[in-house]
Image (cartoon, rainbow, N blue to C red):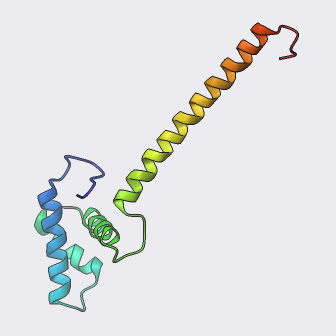
């Protein structure tokens, strides 16, 4: 399953078809660069060349043909970063609560 940066903007079928057309164009003409193939195919499918180039590169990364962080890994990293933020926030609340209750139990403490 491919993760979409902006769900709903372009249908998955269009993305898949455009990527397939770029791959076919490059396999038919081996001298054709990725940029040239993208510039040829993008207007035919109604997509901006930079968008199509990004889709192709993302697919290559996800398939392991290009180095980089896969979509699945990027989603996991994002989820873990959100969890870390929440845990830090919870930790700050617990520290504040523990110092508050420590003062309540022993008013001689300096904090």
Q: Quadrant of the N terminus?
A: bottom left
In this picture, is 40 found above or below 69? below
Q: Give the quadrant of residue 96.
A: top right
| Left or right of residue 13, residue 52 in this image | right
Tell me residue 75's x, y (percent): 38, 52
Tell me residue 6's x, y (percent): 27, 48
The residue located at (14%, 81%) in the rendering is 24
Tell me residue 20's x, y (percent): 15, 73
Tell me residue 25's x, y (percent): 16, 82
| Left or right of residue 64, residue 42 in this image | left
The residue located at (16%, 65%) in the rendering is 16
Closer-to-camera residue (32/107): 107
In this picture, is 37 found above or below 31? above
The residue located at (45%, 52%) in the rendering is 77
The residue located at (14%, 74%) in the rendering is 21
From this viewpoint, which residue is outermost toward the front?
105
In this picture, is 7 found above or below 52? above
Total of numbered circles in the picture? 0
In this picture, is 98 found above or below 39? above
Q: Quadrant of the C terminus?
A: top right
């Amino acid at each position: 399953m491919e993760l979409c940066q902006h769900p709903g903007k372009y249908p998955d079928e269009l993305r898949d078809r455009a990527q397939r057309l770029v791959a076919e164009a490059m396999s038919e003409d081996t001298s054709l660069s990725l940029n040239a193939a993208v510039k040829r195919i993008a207007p035919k499918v109604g997509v901006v060349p930079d968008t199509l180039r990004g889709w192709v590169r993302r697919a290559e990364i996800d398939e392991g043909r290009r180095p980089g962080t896969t979509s699945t890994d990027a989603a996991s990293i994002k989820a873990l970063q959100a969890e870390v933020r929440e845990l830090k926030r919870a930790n700050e609340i617990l520290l504040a609560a523990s110092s508050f209750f420590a003062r309540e139990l022993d008013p001689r403490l300096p904090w």
